[in-house]
Amino acid sequence: MEPDLVETDKKRKRNVSIGSTLQWSQWQLLDSILPTGGFAHSFGLEAAIQARLVSGPDDLKTFIIQLLDNTGSLLLPFVYSTTLNPTLDNWQNLNRILDATLTNEVGRKASVSQGSALMRVAAAAFTDVPSLKSMRDVSVGSGVVPFHHAPVFGLICGLVGMDSGTSQRAYMYVTMRDVISAATRLNLVGPLGASVLQHQIASVAEAMSKKWMDRPVEDACQTAPLLDTLQGCHGYLFSRLFCS
Amino acid sequence: MGSSNGKGRSSWWRMEKEMEKGKVVVEKVRGKSTVTRSFSKYPLKFIIPRKLMIPQGDSISVEFTIGDGCTAVLTTQASTKVYKSLGSKCSEQVLEARIGSGALFAVIPDPVTCFSTARYSQKQVFRVASDSSLVIVDWFTSGRHESGEKWDFELYRSTNHIFSEGNQPVFLDTVLLEQSSPANIAERMHGYQVIAMVIIYGPKLKLVQDQVQENVKRMMSQQLHIPSTSLGHHAKTNSDNCLTRPAFIASCSVFGPKGIGVVVRIASTTTESVYRFLQHQLAGMEPLVGVPPYH
């Protein structure tokens, strides 16, 4: 009896230990302090404000919900696929497909900018996952495949051991986090109001994650053509804080 | 043609989900682009030389082959109207086109108008050579807005794919609008009644591309500005700002290797203003296709 109990306890401690390591990696990946340049992008919010479509907290909430819906329909398939299958071939193929799917030049450049930065940071920091660095080195060398944000995010999550449900929710989370952060810098809402808003929207974000998760890349689609049109106007803004 | 299975029912009664297929081939005959082959079955009907009628029906599929150096233009005679759907049946249209070297294919229809409760899905796939050119206008309205039907349809989906040699994806876009997800469509559209997309692609259209980009930039730069009282809690109410929203929003994006394509996205409060925009921006195509589009 005694040796079995000890064995079970050792196993449990090992599993908790693996789970705990993953948690520390997870928190680091979702922390806004991770230098991925997410703070430079407003996801079309700045253009929406200058077109007078968003002027206060109510408009902002509507905007964020539509943005999250579109993130789910368009980008979650790419996160899903690379989390499940975090191989070089799959990742490079998905980058090519997403490059043709992000027909909005502003959104496409923002995706590449964040994807490159995220890959660089992860390859340097997550040294316990050496394949990150090797995949990065191979792809930078070839120069053909752009590093898009959603596939890179899914790839890293997959390689550190996250499940696809968590990685897809996490992608929705970082999008919500970054657009709310942009909203505070655009003076639409204060930091306290932003925290209240973020918590309010969480249940909507969860519903959207459930609605759009686990879909194949062939089904990726956009659900907010008005927002897409607006985001494309970012380059026409005379004075702007953000890159996109 | 007919046969019966053991249960005594003839299998040629199976009409639901039958894809009506049509085929058009355009080749150079004595230096002129000519329709050399066309095959259509009711309810599809081709009116040559340059107009094509796509009638109502559950599923329509058409294949186009545009030969090297040829030019073909596909238009509609009137707005495609999609009526109320029965149950959850969806009206589906598929267009597949193969465009040869140095050829130009222009798809310049009137907008799709989905009536209350309609379900509509279309897919257009273009396979091009490295020096093919394309103009694709894909647009839809909120419905019979004069009758108060605004964004009242159940489902609208439009897919446009462009593949270059070796099946390389160049442009993969699907727009999906579903009622009540997350809010109803009308709420999401903020008073805009028309959504349009114009793809201008390939070497023959470089001038048109450059001009559109310049025109849109000039037009939109005047419309977009930091609102004078934008500082958070002191912002004007929504109803005030409604008066100052741009009635017409457009943006251009470059896409594809070496920026071979330009896509223009439009949101407008009226159909007329989009017709005017298309007339103006595509006027440069007249020497290529012989007629000014949307006149």
Image (tube, helix red, strand yellow):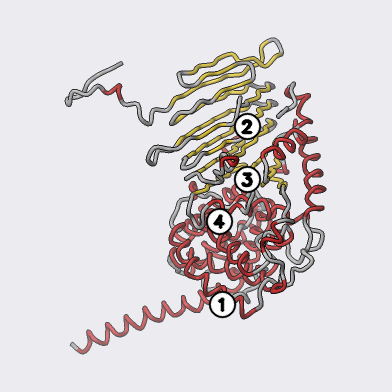
Task: Label 2: state its secondary structure.
Answer: loop
Quick one: A128 or A226, which is closer to the camera?
A: A226
Marking on residue B28 = none
Q: Nearer the viewer, mark 3 or mark 2?
A: 3
- Disc 3 marks a residue whose amino acid type is Gln
Q: CA distance from mark 3 to mark 2?
A: 15 Å
Does residue A162 lie above or below A235 as drawn?
A: below
Does residue B181 lie above or below A17 as drawn?
A: above
Marking on residue A196 = 1
Does residue B243 lie above or below B61 as drawn?
A: below
Instruction: Indicate which disc, 4 or 1, sits on the residue closer to the N terminus.
Output: 4
- Disc 2 marks a residue whose amino acid type is Asp
Q: Nearer the viewer, mark 4 or mark 2?
A: 2
Rendered residue at 51%/57% (across/down) = B183
Q: CA distance from mark 4 to mark 2?
A: 27 Å
Which residue is denoted by mark 2 in the rendering? B110
Q: CA distance from mark 2 to mark 1?
A: 46 Å
Whether residues under marks 3 and 2 lie with C-beta atoms below 8 angstroms apart, the answer is no
Whether residues under marks 3 and 4 lie with C-beta atoms below 8 angstroms apart, the answer is no
Q: Nearer the viewer, mark 4 or mark 1?
A: 1
Subunit under mark 4: A
Subunit under mark 1: A
Q: Position of residue B62 (x, y in %)?
A: 51, 26
Marking on residue A70 = 4
Q: Position of residue A206 (x, y in %)?
A: 46, 66
